[in-house]
Every structure is written in C-alpha cells, then in structure tokens.
C-alpha cells in the first residue's frame, strides 16, 4: 500500500519500472539503429510524462 501511496498514478509506477528495465533491454538485445530510435522515443515519452506530472 505504501508503494501505491508513494506513486499516485499507474503512469508514475510504469515510469519507474521503465527507467529500471528499458536501459537493460537497449544494452542487451537491440541493434544500434533501432536503439537510437528507441532512445529518442523514450526521451520524448519521459518528457511528456514529466510535463504532465509537473516536474
């Protein structure tokens, strides 16, 4: 329950998990061309989420 209180929305929880998991996926099993596109999409997604969270 304290984790749900700490993270007020499922989007915030998903953001925390994506920060932990996505860099490992990019490093381990993604080709360089696709990883560059994926990193740009992840940065854009992170910017949108932080904008909506007011950070």
Image: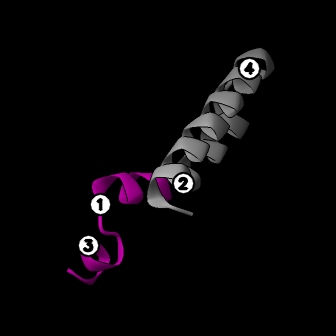
Check disc 3 and report its element: helix, strand or loop: helix
**Residue 11 within the segment the image draws in magenta:** yes
Asked if residue 26 lies left or right of residue 19, the reply is: right
| For marks 2 and 1 on the same chain, the one whose residue lies earlier in the sequence | 1
Q: Give the range drawn in magenta.
A: 1-17
Chain-order first, disc 3 or disc 1: 3
Mark 3 Cα-neighbour bin, 10 Å: few <14, some 14–19, many ≥20: few
Dot placed on the residue nearer the N-terminal end, 4 or 3: 3
Mark 2 / mark 3, whichever is N-terminal:
3
Is disc 4 in contact with disc 1, using a CB cutoff of under 8 Å? no
Q: How crowded is mark 1: few (under 14 residues within 10 Å), some or many (20 or more)?
A: few
Q: Which residue is under mark 3?
A: 4
Which label lies toward us, 3 or 1?
1
Disc 1 secondary structure class:
loop
Closer to the eye: label 4 or 1:
1
Which one is in front in this view, the residue at disc 2 or the one at disc 3? 2
> Residue 22 lies in what quarter of the image?
top right
Instruction: Using a 10 Å C-alpha cutoff, classify the residue at mark 2 as few (fewer than 14 neighbours), some (14 to 19) or many (20 or more).
Output: few
Question: Which numbered marker is on residue 31?
Answer: 4
Q: Is mark 2 on a helix, strand or loop?
A: helix
């Amino acid at each position: 329950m304290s984790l749900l209180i700490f993270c007020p929305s499922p989007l915030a929880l998903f953001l925390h998990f994506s920060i932990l998991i996505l860099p490992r996926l990019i490093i381990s099993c993604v080709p360089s061309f696709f990883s560059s596109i994926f990193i740009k999409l992840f940065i854009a997604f992170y910017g949108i989420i932080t904008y909506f969270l007011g950070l």
